[in-house]
Image (cartoon, rainbow, N blue to C red):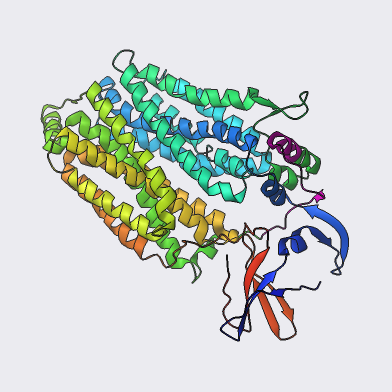
Amino acid sequence: MSLSYERLADSSNEDEEEVNVMHLRNVLSHRRFDKDGGNDGEVTFTVEDAVEHIGFGKFQIFLTLIMGTFSFSDACEMMLLAVLSPVLRCHWQLSSFQVACITTVVFVGMLIGSPVFGTASDRFGRRPILILVAVWICYYGYMTALSPTFFWLLFLRFLVGFGIGGAPQGFTALSEFLPSKQRAKLLGSFQVFWALGTCFEVFMAYLIIPSLGWRYLVGISAVPLTISLLSFLNTSFASMNESMVEHYVPESVRYNIAAGKQEKALETLEKIARTNGIQMPPGELVKSKEVPRGKIQDLFTSDYLRTTLQLWYLWFSAAFGYYGLVLISSEILEFDSVCGAMEKWNQDSLSEDVCYCQLLTKSDYLTLIFTTLGELLAIPINMILPDVIGRTRLLCLYFVVSAIGNGLILVCSTRLVLTITVFAVRACTSGIFNIVYLYTVEVYPTTVRALGLGSGSAIARVGAMITPFVAQVLLTYSIRSAMILYAGVCLLASILSITLPIETKGRSIQEFERQSFTSESKKLQICIYPYMGERGVSAMFTYGHTIHCIG
């Protein structure tokens, strides 16, 4: 195969030329070559080509709304842990350690369930696993409301956590139908669903717990996911042919291709194209070139060792700080602990061998709702600042503000000052998650990207499993020690953020390995990015010098 290029501009360095590789993707992906390098002339396209061609439209909007209910429901189940703790402490006369176990068992279940459902979705498809996850969480969520004892509650919440471990498959399924230009923006929309879910849960607690009790709240918390499940089973759309009805959550096209169901994959793409009012690209659908999977040891090569270790701590800190603040918010409101009341309650309970408890008031619930709205503040910040000041600087800023905020919580002040402080820290801890996720996706190459995300997510769950014993156990003995610990974790994370060896601002995600073409003594190296535009790919043409890719 011959590769031609045209000169775009003169370079000031005679050793370098800028070249435009005309329609490189068409040459490499849209033409089928025989084993001898000849072109048989048949036009082909891959799933990725079809998704980019079809673009973002009606189908993706409805799919986003349906999958967003998964994120909304996850937030309800997680925020339930915070608003439920004060009630259960009184209902069953629980110790602080027992209250912390209620939260920890959920994350243990998530840690175990995530790889189980991830493997199952690769083997049996996204759609059936998502339905199973929705049924699982709904069933054990409703059963939790009927828990006769504390230990039954622990067991059932563990099973709920196991199901929540499979919920991220919803975002995976959505991302497979999104063009690359919209993929990052939709991550922000999922943060909206999460923030709304947490606010909804606190508002329901405000309405239900004082009048009906905690069991009704637990049951109602499973309703949003029940609605999502019904959407999976019943929601349908009419295509251009009004007699043609199809679900808005079809099976993954990539899964069908990998499973050898090419006709089913093509049928799904055609229905999506008709829904969006777009014509399918010409040619035959073919399987994408497989990229070799990396191994866990690839994360520890000389190029990525430092990045991996620092990122793991940032994932840990993100979960440790976020879920810690969620739990601390209800604890400090329950006991007014910033002014020393919690330590007094704990000392009295130890000396008199009784368990003290205090339910949240309606004003406490309103404070929780307001502080939870801080998560919405992080959304516009994450849409603007990462491309202005960079990922590492924004992470550092978030962690520094979180450390200062955790320290200010120690100050015995008015309810207004406390609310504003928690609001600001809630915004920062929420924003950290998205930036850490974005950075992880951008910094690793395709072959180890999934490993980087998976390992980071596992480390985050470890942080989430540990934080209840700080926010709900250590806090009762010494709020000073607990808040200093949270502030210290954030300060160290700020240092590790700003010292990350790679800043990914403006750095495109490479979907393929660099490819080399040799023509006599000249070597052309090309970096292929997911979005190439009409004019093909720009690259720097060098003679044995370092390659400089132009996005």
Q: Residue 124, position in %: x, y? A: 67, 39
Q: Is residue 233 above or below residue 342?
A: above
Q: Residue 443, position in %: x, y? A: 50, 61
The residue located at (38%, 55%) in the rendering is: 314
- In depth, the one of 6 and 298 nearer the eye is 6
Asked if the stretch drawn in magenta spans residue 288, the answer is: yes
The residue located at (29%, 59%) in the rendering is: 492
- In depth, the one of 256 and 401 nearer the eye is 401
The residue located at (47%, 53%) in the rendering is: 438
Q: Residue 114, position in %: x, y? A: 52, 42
Region rendered in magenta:
268-291
Q: Residue 197, position in %: x, y? A: 42, 31
Q: Is residue 332 visible?
A: yes
- In depth, the one of 278 and 59 nearer the eye is 278
Quadrant the N terminus occupies: bottom right
Q: Is residue 388 above or below residue 333?
A: below
Place residue 365 in its image quadrant. Answer: top left
Asked if the stretch drawn in magenta spans residue 97, the answer is: no
Place residue 233 in its image quadrant. Answer: top right
Quadrant the C terminus occupies: bottom right
Residue most extreme to the top? 211
- In depth, the one of 268 and 73 nearer the eye is 268
Q: Is residue 209 above or below residue 135?
A: above
Q: Is residue 249 left or right of residue 395?
A: right
Q: Is residue 94 visible?
A: no
The residue located at (35%, 63%) in the rendering is: 498
Residue most extreme to the front? 9
